[in-house]
Image (cartoon, grey):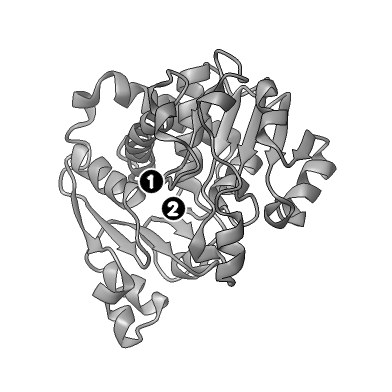
Amino acid sequence: MKKLISPLDLTTQEIDELLALADRIIEDPQAFAHKCDGKILATLFFEPSTRTRLSFESAMLSLGGKVLGFSSANSSSAAKGESVADTVRTVECYADIIAMRHPKEGAATVAASKVDCPLINAGDGGHQHPTQTLTDLLTIHRLKGHLDNLTVGLCGDLKFGRTVHSLIRAMMRYENIKFVLVSPKELQVPDYIRDDLVRSGYEFEEVERLEDAIGKMDILYMTRVQRERFFNEEDYIRLRDSYILDNEKMKLAKEDMIVMHPLPRVNEISVEVDDDPRAAYFRQAKFGRFVRMALILKMLEVE
């Protein structure tokens, strides 16, 4: 595996192998502490990120490797007008593997076509975010014990949220998955996702009120309404507070439901929920480091 642009680039077997390797790393991190000695990861982040960038850097450092890169387009030659293709071809001269985030959909595909070294899409616009999907799958696997026979609720911005699109498509590979899609009409899942669900025969329902559906869910995946994905500020202000998870809503949920969120949150999960044992989003962020460690090992073929 030399390039990872979409979660669909991975077979179910490859995903299972990555999750199994991540399990091994979690159980015995010292056994992997020098697997990437002498290797360099370049993190090319053309838009801001905290968790994704730092978890990639932490992952490589935890494997004994080194990291170089930039955290915004303004701190790279992109500010001078350099193309993504030229940037990645240059960086390939200095690194063994590249993780790239870009605000434009398809940028990672272009970049991957220009380099021979392994390249990981760390998020491109509202399109794909495969390592967040792997993080989500590892979280579900660790906390629920399986990836099948689950009712998965997704709430908030289902139109622009790349994490939502990637997770739905990944979970569609497993047996007996039901989806509950909670959003205002303006932020419902795109037609191509809905068409995929219909064509594949997966059971799903679309509702506007979280209270009406939370009791059915084994997993609740919350998302924020993202200002940067809106063209109209008035629409953003009108919709941003549509769905806020608090202790009152949590009373309606199953005792073993888990709450996930790709973070950062704004106010869509009240801080009072943080103390609920079902709140898994900070554990989810921690699992992100381990699954990225597994992915780096696989892509560099040093596992």
Q: Is 236 or 165 nearer to us in this picture?
A: 236
Location of mark 2 (residue): 2
Q: Within 10 angstroms of label 2, few (less than 14), some, or many (20 or more) residues?
A: some
- The image position of residue 68, as x and y in percent, is 20, 60
Determine the image quadrant of residue 265. Answer: top left
Q: Going 50% across and 51% down the picture, which residue do you hit?
A: 129
Q: Is residue 275 left or right of residue 197?
A: left
- Residue 271 x, y percent position in the rendering: 39, 33
Q: In percent of the image, x 30 and y 44: which residue is there?
A: 55
> From what the image shows, is residue 16 above or below residue 191?
above
Q: Quadrant of residue 170?
A: top right
Q: Nearer the viewer, residue 88 or 175?
A: 175
Image x and y of residue 83, in percent: 39, 81
The amino acid marked with disc number 2 is: Lys
In the displayed structure, 301 sits above or below 259; it is: below
Residue at the farthest top position: 255
Residue at point 66%, 34% (across, down): 210
Res. 172 in view? no
Mark 2 and mark 1 residues within 8 Å of each other at the beta carbon: yes
Picture quadrant where residue 212 is located: top right
Amino acid type for the residue under numbered disc 1: Met
- Residue 59 visible in the snapshot: yes
Q: Earlier in the sequence, mark 2 or mark 1?
A: 2
Which quadrant holds the C terminus? top left
Secondary structure beneath label 1: helix
Q: What element does badge 2 sit on?
A: loop
How dense is the environment of label 1, judged by Cα within 10 Å: few (below 14), some, or many (20 and up)? some
Q: Which residue is mark 1?
A: 299
